[in-house]
Amino acid sequence: MSRIAIVDDSRLVRTFVAGVLRAKGHETVAVEPVSLFEVLKVLRESPVDLLLADFLMPDCPGESLVRACREDEALVELPILMISAHRDDECLIRLQKLGISGFLLKPVDPAVLVDKVDEALAG
């Protein structure tokens, strides 16, 4: 199956999402967002097929992460799903213009998560 990076400042969310995706046969890489630089370093050094990232993280804002990926030659084509507890339509429009593959609201429903991941991986 696919290798998926999970970037969220909540260990509980990282663990939950990883468990759901592993149960479907995916390999997961849980990344604690210490800084934008560190997350990008992990993504470059350990390539993945999909990035699943929280939008509101204090040390690695989701929109900044998406922009950095789109500006990085090695990550420009990486499918990205954003997760957030809050829906901000203006922000969602900006993220869509940056080319995210989808958006999930917390709390994440496991079936919706699997469907969105499958869609993002299918392109």
Image: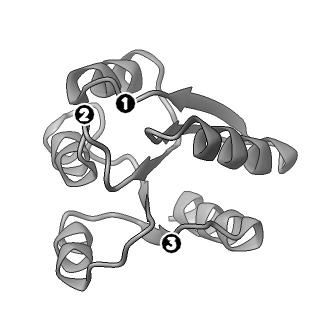
Q: Amino acid at mark 2?
A: Asp
Is label 1 in contact with label 2 (beta carbons under 8 Å)? yes
- Which tag, 3 or 2, sits closer to the chain's start? 2
Q: Amino acid at mark 1?
A: Pro
Name the residue that disc number 1 marks. 33
Label drawn at residue 105? 3
Name the residue that disc number 2 marks. 59
- Which tag, 3 or 1, sits closer to the chain's start? 1
CA distance for labels 3 and 2 = 20 Å
CA distance for labels 1 and 2 = 6 Å
Q: Residue furthest bottom?
A: 89
Task: Say few, some or many: other residues with alpha carbon within 10 Å of mark 1 (under 14 / 14 to 19 / 20 or more).
Answer: many
CA distance for labels 3 and 1 = 19 Å
Tag 1's secondary structure? loop
* Residue 24 drawn above or below residue 35: below
User: 3 or 93: nearer the eye?
Assistant: 93
- What residue sits 29% from the left and 27% below the top? 40
